[in-house]
Image (cartoon, grey):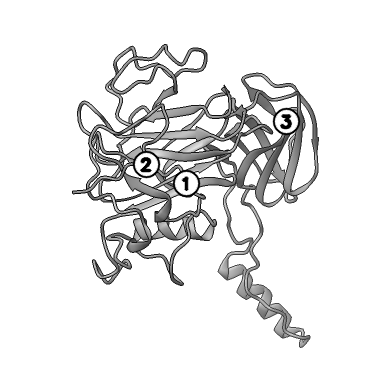
């Protein structure tokens, strides 16, 4: 979510120190009880937006850091959605609109006011509510791609539905290097969605929402739905995280952790090599998207990427029970990468 705020006030104490001391002296001279003479802070800071999200096909929830209301007549949504009602005063305010397109990106512009009259204008994106997200799993990925077979991720739909608003993160839901929010797209049970992580900018690299055979480019599939993650950095070859959520800020549908490190690789970061990587692994565990063997996640709990290449991808096994652990995965032999079709259960042997 992108939030832009225009603050219209600052926070200052109402009494200068000299004036505060004068008041204290007057009270003391009167021999009355001595009150707290320290300057009391007056709230001159406008409300800050914490989140904007679609909570229903016609409902948008706006959360603030303090009690606030939306200023009447100041709310608009682009692409155009008619605002029918603004209700509630508090840290969460609800907007009723005409029906949203599932997964479509919208921008809400509005003005909010707190109980002290402080106001702020803001703009924030949200995605149209999607009640028909199909069951999806990460099915195959290549973290060590090549020029002819670049890094890619394959998703598989285990039911029919619409993937509009579903988000794939190169990282964890709360910490990622890049992400793709899918546009509205109806998929059938058994459909494959291939996300290419290092596009070249070739005009044939088309995001497919109508014809699955319309895209060109390296490893484009004639049968799967191809998407191209613009300006993506690719995947780390040795130590990384992928996650899939039903919407930005929503529930985690699936995730995978891979690492060729050990708990002894370093002392500071639990073997993960960086505070960021350890935090991402721990976030997956906290969301129930990855299950460590012990009390705390370690690199050994991840899928070992050793042996994988551009043609030896890391595949989910057909017997996978989605146990959210390394036993669901294996590296396939050379030329057995299968983006856009069923995975091979053959295992690479060095």
Q: Are marks 3 and 2 in contact (CB under 8 Å)?
A: no
Determine whether 120 is above or below 128 in the image.
Answer: below
Q: Which sits earlier in the primary sequence, circle 3 or circle 2?
A: 3
Residue located beneath label 1 in the image: 319
Classify 10 Å Cα crowding around label 3: few (below 14), some (14-19), many (20 and above).
some
* Residue lying at 61% horizontally and 33% vertically, measured from the top left: 159
Residue 210 x/y as whole percent: 52, 13
Distance Cα–Cα, label 3 vs label 2: 41 Å
Which numbered disc, 3 or 2, marks the residue closer to the eye?
2
Which mark is on residue 143? none
Which numbered disc, 3 or 1, marks the residue closer to the eye?
1
Residue located beneath label 2 in the image: 345
* Residue lying at 66% horizontally and 76% vertically, measured from the top left: 37
Residue 73 x/y as whole percent: 75, 27
As helix, strand or loop, the secondary structure at mark 1 comes to loop
As helix, strand or loop, the secondary structure at mark 2 comes to loop
- 19 or 3, nearer to the observer: 3
Q: Quadrant of residue 80?
A: top right
Left or right: residue 45 compared with residue 307: right
Residue 147 x/y as whole percent: 20, 28
Determine whether 177 is above or below 98 in the image.
Answer: below
Residue 124 x/y as whole percent: 58, 35
Q: Which sits earlier in the primary sequence, circle 3 or circle 1?
A: 3
Q: Which sits earlier in the primary sequence, circle 1 or circle 2?
A: 1
* Residue 68 in view here: no
Classify 10 Å Cα crowding around label 2: few (below 14), some (14-19), many (20 and above).
some
- 335 or 178, nearer to the observer: 335
Q: Are marks 1 and 2 in contact (CB under 8 Å)?
A: yes
Residue located beneath label 3 in the image: 57
């Amino acid at each position: 979510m992108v939030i832009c705020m225009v603050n219209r006030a600052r926070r200052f104490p109402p009494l200068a120190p000299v004036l505060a001391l004068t008041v204290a002296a007057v009270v003391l001279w009167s021999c009355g009880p001595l009150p707290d003479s320290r300057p009391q802070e007056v709230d001159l800071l406008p409300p800050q937006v914490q989140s904007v999200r679609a909570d229903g096909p016609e409902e948008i929830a706006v959360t603030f850091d303090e009690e606030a209301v939306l200023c009447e007549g100041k709310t608009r949504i682009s692409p155009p959605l008619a605002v029918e009602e603004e209700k509630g005063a508090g840290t969460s305010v609800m907007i009723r609109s005409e029906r949203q397109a599932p997964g479509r990106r919208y921008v809400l512009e509005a003005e909010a006011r707190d109980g002290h009259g402080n106001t702020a204008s803001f703009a924030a994106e949200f995605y149209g509510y999607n009640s028909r997200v199909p069951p999806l799993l990460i099915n195959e990925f290549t973290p060590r791609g090549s020029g002819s077979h670049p890094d890619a991720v394959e998703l598989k739909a285990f039911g029919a539905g619409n993937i509009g608003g579903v988000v794939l993160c190169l990282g964890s839901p709360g910490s990622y290097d890049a992400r793709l929010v899918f546009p509205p797209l109806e998929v059938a049970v058994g459909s494959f969605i291939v996300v290419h992580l290092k596009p070249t900018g070739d005009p044939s690299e088309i995001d497919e929402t109508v014809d699955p055979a319309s895209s060109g480019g390296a490893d484009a599939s004639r049968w799967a739905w191809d998407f191209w993650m613009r300006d993506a950095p690719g995947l780390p070859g040795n130590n990384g995280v992928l996650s899939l959520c039903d919407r930005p800020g929503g529930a985690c549908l699936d995730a995978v952790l891979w690492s060729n490190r050990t708990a002894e690789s370093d002392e500071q970061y639990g073997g993960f090599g960086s505070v960021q990587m350890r935090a991402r692994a721990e976030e997956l565990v906290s969301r129930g998207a990855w299950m460590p063997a012990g009390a705390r996640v370690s690199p050994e709990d991840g899928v070992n990427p050793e042996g994988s290449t551009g043609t030896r991808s890391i595949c989910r096994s057909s017997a996978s029970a989605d146990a959210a652990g390394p036993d669901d995965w294996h590296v396939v032999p050379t030329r057995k990468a299968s983006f856009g079709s069923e995975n091979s259960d053959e295992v690479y042997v060095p």
